[in-house]
Amino acid sequence: MKTTKGNRLHIGFFGKRNVGKSSIVNKITGQDLSIVSNIKGTTTDVNEKAMELLPIGPVVLMDTAGFDDTGKIGSLRIEKTKKALERTDVAVLVLDDTAPTVDDLNFFKLLKEKQLPVLTIINKIDKGLLSESKIENIKNFSDVIIRLSAERDADISAKFKEALIKILPEDFIKQTSILGDIINKSETAVLVIPIDKEAPKGRLILPQVNTIRDLLDNNAISVIVKETELQNALDNMKTPPKIVITDSQAFGKVSKIVPENIKLTSFSILFARLKGDLKTFIKGANKFDSLNDNDTILILESCSHHPIEDDIGRVKIPNLIRKYSGKDLIFEYKSGHDLPKNIQDYSLIIHCGACMTNRKEMLNRIDISIKNNTPITNYGIAIAKCLGILQRAVKPFIEDDI
C-alpha cells in the first residue's frame, strides 16, 4: 500500500516569481510536475507531488506561486502560497543569485515565526556569484544553504537530499508509533471494522490499514472482526486482548460487549492522539454540555468525498449531538485544506479523523481554533462523549478523570 499524504513529510518550495522553483522541483522529481517558463507567474497554484525520496522516505513536494505576485489575482495566489505553510514540515526558500530582496527577507521572517526548518537554495549561480557579505543576511534565517544551477547541474537531487537530511524535524526522524507505547510484542489487539456503506468496497479505510501496519511493526497480533462477530472472537480467545479498537460508528454496541478490564478506544481517537492534541479535543467535546439553541457547529473534513445517505460527519454525528444536547443546532460543513475565515463565529468545530492531513496542518488548525476561542474536537471523541463512554475511550492514554 502507498503511504498516504497525511503520513508524508511535506516540503514546500517558496520564492519570488521566476527564481527557478519549478525547475528545481522538476529536477528532484524527475518529472515535469510544473510548467517552466521565462514568463513570471507561470505557477499559479500549489502543485503537489507525492513520492519516495530515498533515503528519506515518503514525502510530498509542494511547488508554490511566487510570493511577489501582483494584481488582484496575484494577491489570491500569494494567499494560496501562504496557506501552504500550514501543512509544511520543511520550507525551501529559493533565491536567484542576487542580493535578497525585501520580499525575500519578509518571507524569511514569516518562516521563522512559523518555527519551520529552512533550507535556502541559491539558484542560477552560473549567472553570477553572490558575495559572502550578501549571504550574511540569509544565514540568520537559514538552517542550511546550498548553491546550484537548475539549468546546468546534473546532481541537484543529490545536493538537495544531502542538505535536507541535516534539517529534518525530530518527530519525522523518530516516527511516532500509533500503538507502540500501548501494546507489547505478542500481545493481541482486536480491531472491530463494520462493513457497511461507509466501508469502501474491496478495501479498508486508511486509519484501519495504518493501525494494522503499526501492530505488525510492533510485532503484535491483530484479530480483525466485524462488530457482529466480536462476542464470538472474545469468547474463543484463551488470553484476553490488550486492547479493542473499534470504528467510531460501532462504539456504542462494542462498548457493551467488551469487558471493563479490557482497554477500549476507536481508530478516530488513535489518530486524534497521533496527529492532534487529545486533551484539547476532550475539552472541546465538553462544550456539548453548554450548547444553546441556534449555535452553529462546523464539521471540518480534511479531504473531499461524496457524502452518502447516512454519512458519519453530515448525518450521524449531528443527530447524536442534537440528541445529547437537546438543542436546535445549526451545522455547516467544510472540506479541504482551507479553513473558513470566520472561525470565531462558530460555537464548536468537529474535525474528522485527519487520516489525509499531516500533523503539522492538524496542529495549525488547533492553534487557529484556540486563538479564536473556538473549541475543537474530533469525530471519535465527539461520538464517545455523546454515548457516555468518553472516559473509558481515552483511558488507555489518559488516566486522569476528564
Image (spheres, rainbow, N blue to C red):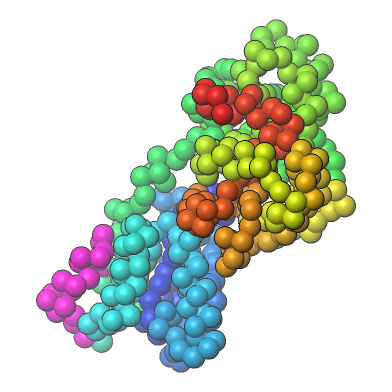
Q: Is residue 208 above or below residue 76?
A: above
Q: Is residue 2 among what the camera can see?
A: no
Compare residues 343 and 258 and report the one nearer the observer.
Answer: 343
The image shows residue 324 at horizontal and vertical percentages of 76, 38
Which residue is most to the right? 309
Residue 302 image-quadrant placement:
bottom right
**Of residues 32 and 207, the one drawn nearer to the viewer in this rendering:** 207
- Residue located at (41% from left, 51% from top): 56
Which of these two is toward me, 223 or 399? Answer: 399
Q: Position of residue 267 (x, y in %)?
A: 65, 36
x%, y% of residue 20? 39, 80
**Does the magenta-highlighted stretch encompass residue 249?**
no
- Give the left or right position of residue 20, taking residue 62 as reference: left
Who's the residue at 40% across and 72% down the image? Answer: 14
Can you say which quadrant of the picture contains the C terminus?
A: top right
Residue drawn at 42 percent across, 56 percent down? 89
Q: Is residue 194 left or right of residue 157?
A: right
Is residue 44 among the parts visible in the rendering?
A: yes
Q: Tell me residue 15's x, y (percent).
A: 38, 76
Does 142 appear in magenta? yes
Extent of the magenta region: 128-146
